Amino acid sequence: MARGLWLISRAVGRLRPLLVQGPTRSFSASAPEQLHVCVVGSGPAGFYTADRMLKGHEGAQVDIIDRLPTPFGLVRSGVAPDHPETKIVVNQFSRVAANGRCSFFGNVTLGRDISLSELRKTYHAVVLAYGAESDRSLGIPGEDLKGIHSAREFVWWYNGHPDMCDLCPDLKNTESAVVLGQGNVALDVARILLRCKAELATTDITDYALDALRGSTIRKVYLVGRRGPVQAACTAKELREILGLKNVRICIKETDLVTTPADEEEMRNSRIQRRVYELLLKAASAHGGNNYNDQKELHFVFFRRPTRFIPAENGSTIGAVQLEKTVLKGDEVTGKQVAVGAGEFEDLKCGSCAKFKRKSPEQRIRDCHSRKRLVRGRMVKERTNWDCCNKSSLC
């Protein structure tokens, strides 16, 4: 056991160090007391796991493998390009990778280049720290129409992920886009679509995405949520940023801002929800009236859920989203207010649609700060204020 990654590399032929350019190491079977761990996935969960292993176990060797040639996962491909402060965490990850007891091996796909059983035979422990790479279907008619993209696809596209470089979303043949969701990732996408392109040019956004956005004809973006403004899933920081975009008018229906006793109770129990609601209320008052100076528009649409994607005249691309009005009812199990259909429908025309059903990359990075330790061969979580959403499995 623990004979090292170089034994595996002879069989696989694809494992190679990318970050640490040092002397070739071999791990002798004569020193079985040294913990030798393989971490699959080089995102925040992977690097935080490696960091804790190196600090908590003297002499431990950690090998990080990833299917991509570059490390850092969602920090590189998930965080919006105009949020460089969040990407600073790569400095910490680079220090971990520079540790003489840590190596990174890219272009290695678990299940294709090497099997889990091979890893388990070679290492004392294998930690699966990779995130989800598939999309959750909404399960409604028309979801396969052209012009409908998932959060993963669209975010990976403008961040230059190799899997989505050829996505080429059509931003030229419509003036409106619908974003299903009101979390931080949804706000990221809306902000990228509406933000001044001169400002985006100063970020590390990919050249092809910037060129496509410069040619975009989208003037209106609709952020659609199943519940109300009190339950909006975004954070105050992200909301404040998008509400302050230059030359963008914020549109919110006054009737959607009316609160119920249950809403008031939620806000008393959550300072974040109260602050988000106050920001939306203030924005609705400040941006009332007509659209002047050819401003772009950001519409917050509450109490609506998608029920069908309607094709355009050509039958292959999206032309509109059918929305059902919702009302909030208390859930006896969770105690939270949930959205239920009211049986009233309306169509929202658009030429592009993005759907979001995942936690934001920045929130996932913060969640992965959750401290872990190895106890008798099991990875356990120490007491913390955060829950780790990008689950790491120890094999």
Image: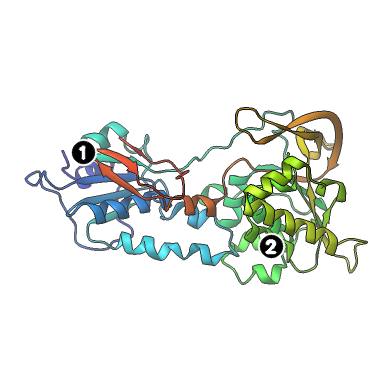
Q: Is residue 13 above or below residue 88?
A: above
Q: Position of residue 164 (x, y in %)?
A: 57, 48
* Residue type of the residue flagged with mark 2: Arg
Q: Nearer the viewer, residue 53 or 163?
A: 53
Q: Is residue 335 above or below residue 286?
A: above
Residue 94 lies in quadrant: bottom left
Q: Nearer the viewer, mark 2 or mark 1?
A: 2
Q: Position of residue 52 (x, y in %)?
A: 30, 53
* Residue type of the residue flagged with mark 1: Thr
Q: Quadrant of the C terminus?
A: top left
Q: Nearer the viewer, residue 372 or 348?
A: 372
The residue under label 2 is 240
Disc 1 element: helix
* Crowding near the residue tagged with mark 2, few <14, some 14–19, many ≥20 C-alpha atoms within 10 Å: some
Q: Position of residue 182 (x, y in %)?
A: 69, 48
Q: Quadrant of the N terminus?
A: top left
Residue drawn where x is 32% and y is 45% of the image: 39
Report the Cα–Cα distance between label 2 and label 1: 50 Å
Residue 114 lies in quadrant: top left
The residue under label 1 is 122
* Crowding near the residue tagged with mark 1, few <14, some 14–19, many ≥20 C-alpha atoms within 10 Å: many
